[in-house]
Image: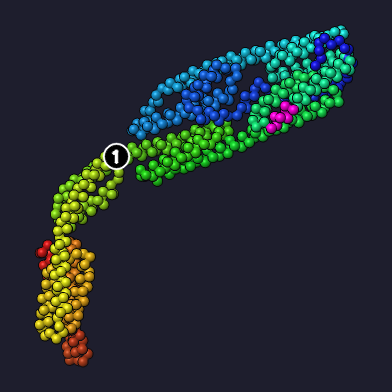
Amino acid sequence: MMDAHDTTLPLNQGKLEEEKKTSEVSEVIIETPVENVDAVKEPEETTKQMDKEEILNRLKELAQNTENTNKQEIDNLKQAFYKLHNAELEAAKKLFLDNGGVEEDFLPEEDPAEINFKRLMSGIKEKRSVFAAELERQKEDNLQVKLSIIEELKELVESGDDANKSYTEFKKLQQQWNETKLVPQGKVNEIWKNYQLYVEKFYDLLKLNNEFREYDFKKNLEIKTHLCEAAEKLTNEEDVVSAFHQLQKLHQEFRDTGPVAKDLRDEVWNRFKTASTAVNRRHQQHFEELKEVEQHNLDQKTVICEIVEAIEYDELKTFTSWENKTQEVIALQNKWKTIGFAPQRMNVKIFDRFRQACDEFFKKKGEFFKTLKEGMNENLEKKKALCETAEALKDSTDWKVTSDALTALQKEWKTIGPVAKKHSDAIWKRFISACDHFFEQKKKSNSSQRSVELENMEKKKAVIEKLSSIDEKMDTDEATTLVRELMKEWNSIGHVPFKEKDKLYKLYHAQIDLLFGRFNISTSHKKLSNFRSNISNIQESGPQPLYREREKLMRTYDNMKSELQTYENNLGFLTSTSKKGSSLLTELNRKVEKLKADLELVMQKIKVIDESLREE
């Protein structure tokens, strides 16, 4: 730039070329005003991690310096605060409902932090409003100052006075212009064009010599080259938003710097414009990518909403199913927290949708547990009744019947639903203690009975040895009598250890079958003997199976008796005059005799059962 004391006269330069370059510079002013760049601020991720106290402390700091406060940061702090505040309200509401409260009766407690938050926000808003009003007033004042400067430049150009003598005043007006900063956005381009017009006119009028003008151009070239380099470095700046804001300042400096030599003007300007285009493109791409990310976030949040909304409440009928589904909903809530912002126009709507779906879920859960609580009281009464029954049976010595009864009680216990946790352990201990008492007593009784069973096992082994010692040369009648006596002795012996029963039974019947075949003992007697052994085994399970077996035999007896009567009636109609009639008569007589023998065997079996029941 030119020194105010330099008296070297300049040469007049072409006005049209200066005006053309001035017009080109004015046309590339960035449309986004420097003073409004907060409108495109990125969301602050750090506010997500802050608690209420940290948010309030940050607001206090901002309240002390509202002139440099970023509106986006204030909005982020507000959103973060109410996210925490609403979460606390939801937790308090859930606790209220879980404790049996009705949703309509829920009144949140006053939050001192919220009162402090609102007070700080109100103060900041008021200060920002004052600051904004003051800024607008200052812009209007600056506009009047710059209009006054233009008028003075106009007077210098149109006065006809020697421009060399006016140069010092011209430089003062330039300096005053550069020191006067912001004006209303709508006037920026217009006022700049007017100012540049008279600056160029003044330079055209100014008769500076070539040496002085080249010096001025050289200084301006150095400044603009430095601005080009600074703009080119911004293309590698990681923070594209910060790079965009810095570029605005560089443009302001570029406009405030005077012209360079004519042959370098296009080159310098194109270099600066190329760097500016690269920075602006990155800035635009950044926000396009941000929009894509926000849309992806919206898609993810929409899917989560649909999952919660699609819950089939009719299928949630147990405590476990509700708890499992609750864990799924909580997992979805945690997933939601990891997803970033949705587009601004949808961010609040999608959150309200998700919150409504979650509220509906926990409302349904509260209703279920309220009903479950009533059912638990009924279950408790049922289990108390089972306890009383078990306690009444615990000292019984009717081991088989009582065992079955307690087993049935235990099965019934499993069919009864849960009781309240505070009663669960106590009622179960009461029930199982009664059952354990009985089964311990039964175990002690069985241990004494085991010695008797072992003694019976030895007796039955002795019977088997006696049967195996019967010689085949023994007289048939004598052998038959001995076999029957040993069979009677076998049947009179009591129970043996369960694990030895089948083995002894097989040995016994194998020996009986051998002797029956050897001495041709009647089949009926053999069947009756086998039946006695079977009844002995059935008897171990209690009297009920014996009663069922007796009823079965009685039905068989009645059927066979009816069949016998039919045969006997038919015999009355047959004669033996023909060969065929004689053959049929013989067959019927044979069947009648067989039925009578079978009837006798059935009656004997019934007697065996009756004897066993009397022994019970």
Image quadrant assignment for residue 186: top right
The front one of 491 and 192 is: 491
Against 156, residue 482 (above or below) is below
Mark 1 nearby-residue class (10 Å; few <14, some 14–19, many ≥20): some
- Residue 252 located within the stretch drawn in magenta: no
**In this rendering, does residue 267 appear at all?**
yes
The picture places residue 296, in percent across and down from the top left corner, at 58, 39
Q: Main secondary structure of the magenta part?
A: helix
198 relative position to 65: left or right: right
The picture places residue 165, in percent across and down from the top left corner, at 85, 8
Image quarter in which the C terminus is found? bottom left
**In this rendering, does residue 569 appear at all?**
no
The front one of 469 and 46 is: 469
86 relative position to 18: left or right: left
Against 315, residue 605 (above or below) is below
Against 294, residue 151 (above or below) is above
Image quadrant assignment for residue 209: top right
SS type, badge 1: loop
Q: Which residues are magenta?
A: 229-236
Residue under the image location 15 percent in, 77 percent down? 467
Q: Which residue is mark 1?
A: 420
The front one of 139 and 162 is: 162
The picture places residue 557, in percent across and down from the top left corner, at 16, 72
Residue under the image location 45 percent in, 30 percent down? 87
Image quarter in which the N terminus is found? top right
242 relative position to 62: left or right: right
